[in-house]
Amino acid sequence: MTYGSLDEYFNRPPEVYAEPLRRSVEEQVRIAVVELLTMAEGRIIIVDGCFPCDMLHRISTPDRVVILMAHI
């Protein structure tokens, strides 16, 4: 997508701005998961990362995943 000016680019609606970022992060997460699974080779690994819960359910069992959330 091409924009006519910097103002037009930076004043996009939040949904228009967020969609390409969401797709990019989704692709990066898939690549990271493949690399982690390859690296694990059947061993237990500990990862500090940001992964969607639905993806964690596909690659592990609930008793092997810990999710920590900050309370501010």
Image (cartoon, rainbow, N blue to C red):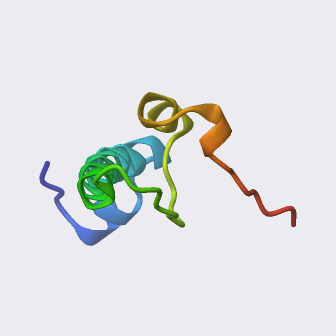
Residue at the farthest right position: 72
Camera-nearest residue between 35 and 54: 35
- Residue 55 shown left or right of residue 8 in the figure: right
Q: Where is residue 26 shown, x and y percent of the image?
A: 33, 45
Residue at the farthest left position: 2
Residue at x-position 37% and y-position 65%: 10
- Residue 62 shown left or right of residue 41 in the figure: right
Q: Where is residue 59 shown, x and y percent of the image?
A: 42, 35
Residue at the farthest bottom position: 6
33 is higher (above) or lower (below) than 47: above
15 is higher (above) or lower (below) than 61: below
Camera-nearest residue between 9 and 18: 18
Residue at x-position 79% and y-position 63%: 70
Residue at the farthest front position: 43
- Residue 35 shown left or right of residue 52 in the figure: left
- Residue 62 shown left or right of residue 60 in the figure: right
> Total number of numbered labels?
0
36 is higher (above) or lower (below) than 5: above
Q: Which quadrant, please, contains the C terminus? A: bottom right
Camera-nearest residue between 23 and 68: 68
Q: Where is residue 58 shown, x and y percent of the image?
A: 43, 29
Q: Where is residue 48 shown, x and y percent of the image?
A: 54, 67
